[in-house]
Image (spheres, grey):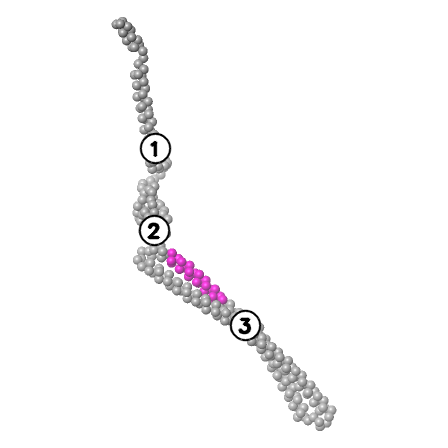
Amino acid sequence: MASSDINIERELKALPLETTTLLGAADSGRVVSRWLIGILLVLVAIMFLPWQQNVQGNGNVTALSPADRPQQLQSRIDGRIEAWFVSEGQFVKKGDSIVRISEIKEEYLNPNVLPLTQQQQSAKQSAIEEKLNKAAALSQLIERLEQQRDFKLQQTANKVLQYQAEVRQATLEDSVARDQLRRRERLFRDSLGLVSVNDLQTFQIRVQSAAAKLVEKQQMLAITQTDLQSIPAEYGEKIAKSRSDRAATLAEVSEGRSDVAKLKDKVGSL
């Protein structure tokens, strides 16, 4: 028994110690896994850090702080940025104060700029209403001028017809008077003592009177026809001037409305 125990012990010493080897291998794998997990955690942490790209280059540094760099901010009123309340890359929500802006226009420094602007807006609106009333009055004037032109054209045309009838009547009377005078002259030459000199002179006077009347009626007809032709030009000039004044007034109204819109926008921005 003793010799066999000794042999078994020798055989065990001769065998490799696998347990010890496995224990050493397990410790090495644990260390490697820890290193891998640590590196992975570092990489994940780096992903959530603020990232900024760096580029090498030559030059002079003008502003170390981002707040000192020239920056632009969209605003309804021009101004100069005095202070930043947020930093670059920071998340903001609606209603947060971003910057404090100081006015650069002297008119905004006036505490009465708002009431003065409102007064200007009211004055412009009143001026627009007055110009609209003027445009309406000019429209009525144009309408009256057109009515007067049409009435005068009709009236003068009637006069032309009247004088044309009177000229025809005067022409007939002149023709009758000349015919009577010719017969009296024939009787005066052919019959002795039947027609006196006074009767002959009376008919001569009638002829002269009829001729004068005919000339008078012809002149009146010519004058009336000239008036009829001049009426469109006379009233056309007045109507054209009134229309031009109305167009200019409406243009001023449009310009005034544009000014009112600008003042309204300015009041809303103050």
Q: For mark 1, what is the residue?
A: 44
Local SS, label 1: helix
Instruction: Name the image quarter holding the N terminus.
Output: top left
Instruction: Name the image quarter holding the C terminus.
Output: bottom left
Q: Position of residue 32 (x, y in %)?
A: 33, 24
Q: Residues within 10 Å of mark 2 (few under 14, many from 20)?
A: some
Residue 52 visible in the displayed image = yes
Residue at image coords 45%, 65%: 249
Image quadrant where residue 28 sits: top left
Q: Nearer the viewer, mark 2 or mark 3?
A: 3
Foreground residue, 230 or 151? 151
Local SS, label 2: strand
The stretch in magenta equals: 243-265
**Marked residue nearer the N-terminal end (3 or 1):** 1
Local SS, label 3: helix
Q: Nearer the viewer, mark 2 or mark 1?
A: 1
Q: For mark 3, what is the residue?
A: 150
**For the residue marked with disc 3, what is the amino acid?**
Asp
**Does residue 230 appear left or right of residue 187 in this picture?**
left
Q: Residues within 10 Å of mark 1 (few under 14, many from 20)?
A: few
Residue 99 visible in the displayed image = no
**For the residue marked with disc 2, what is the amino acid?**
Gly
Residue at image coords 30%, 10%: 12
In the orientation shown, which residue stands out farthest toward the right?
190
In the orientation shown, which residue stands out farthest toward the front?
1
Residue 79: assigned label: 2
Foreground residue, 221 or 2? 2
How far is mark 2 from mark 1, CA to CA?
43 Å
Q: Position of residue 191 (x, y in %)?
A: 73, 93
